[in-house]
Amino acid sequence: MKENMTQMQNESLARSFPLAKFRQTWQHGDWLYRFAILVAGLLVILLVFAIGFELWQNSALARHAFGWKFIYTSEWDPAITNTFGALPYIWGTFVTAFIALIVAIPLSLGTAIFIAELAPNWIKQPIGFLVELLAAVPSVVFGLWGLFAYIPVFIRPTSEVLNRSLGFLSLFAGPVYGPSRLAAGLLLAIMVFPTITAVSRDVFQAIPDAQREASLALGATHWEMISQVLIPYGTSGLLGAIILGLGRALGETIAVTMVIGNNLDLSASLLHPGYTMASIIANEFTEATFNLYLHALIEIGLILFVVTLLVNSVARLLIWRVSGRTRIEARA
């Protein structure tokens, strides 16, 4: 009898052991949390590949018709010859993004340093709020403001002065129209300014106070503490902020479309109207009345997608390199 009871208890324990182990495994949610995080990460990777695959598939006609020539030719004639080349749009995209970063980076870093290190407490919050509010303004509002206020009041007079004084340079050759690559680049600078500023401010505020106290204790001035300690310490984060701004500058559509002039121009002059990859897609996608035309526009989207991935990959490698060097110098 005792043997039967013991055998029944053992069988019951054997049956309940997997259930108990399962309950113990999922009791605190660790495995569920890890599984959810893994799925989320894989979905992001899958989404990137899905976007690239869709763009690749739907640009097949243009790729087969023009090959690599599509990237370095400038003719765009959907009406007569059905010939397409993306060089003016690639050129316009890089020029406007470069202007935006050249203007926005010093202004953004200076504002971030002022908010995080120099501003009195009573003004930090209002300025930080205004910066974040500027980041929330829709692109179309920037475009309307740029078209009806920014260009007539600032861009056209500035362009005329540059043309009169530096018109012998190809960068500032006339005639002056108003809507131009310069207008688009400066408007993009205003649009990426709050992004770079907000992230850079957070980077400076995240630096331990021990770094500030140590440098000041060694006799450094306030400026030496900022330039020789804080900026090198936060270099990787500052680079990340700049890359976020560059990503918006490369992909911005509606605001750029409204102020760049939308003219097929491959000249070096910043005062001439131009195009970007995003603006040509926004302008002509609904007008693509045959498949080759549509596939050419989608191939421009594919080029923009690849450029964005390459820029972010190079930036990530640069950030890793700078972070590793900073850690080595900190140990030394």
Image (cartoon, helix red, strand yellow):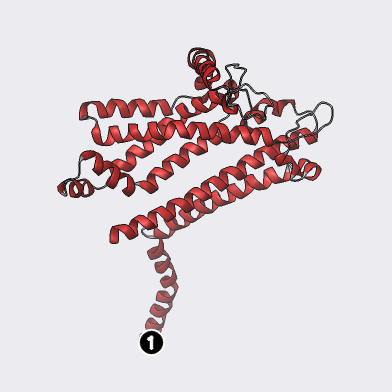
Position of the N terminus, as image quadrant, is bottom left
Does residue 246 lie above or below 4 as drawn?
above
Amino acid at dot 1: Glu
- Which residue is drawn at the image coordinates 48% and 53% (left, top)? 317
- Which residue is drawn at the image coordinates 30% and 41% (left, top)? 204
Q: As rendered, which of 16 and 111 lies closer to the eye?
A: 111
- Which residue is drawn at the image coordinates 33% and 27% (left, top)? 129
Q: As rendered, which of 13 and 328 lies closer to the eye?
A: 328
List the residue tagged with mark 1: 3
Q: As rendered, which of 99 and 139 lies closer to the eye?
A: 99
- In the drawing, does residue 235 fall left or right of residue 151? left
Residue 318 image offset from top left, x and y in percent? 46, 51
Q: How many marks?
A: 1
Q: Is residue 288 visible?
A: yes
Residue 74 image offset from top left, x and y in percent? 73, 34
Position of the C terminus, as image quadrant, is bottom left
Residue 300 found in image quarter:
top right
- Which residue is drawn at the image coordinates 21% and 39% (left, top)? 222
Residue 263 image offset from top left, x and y in percent? 67, 23
Q: Is residue 29 visible?
A: no
Secondary element at image label 1: helix
Residue 287 found in image quarter:
top right
Residue 89 found in image quarter:
top right
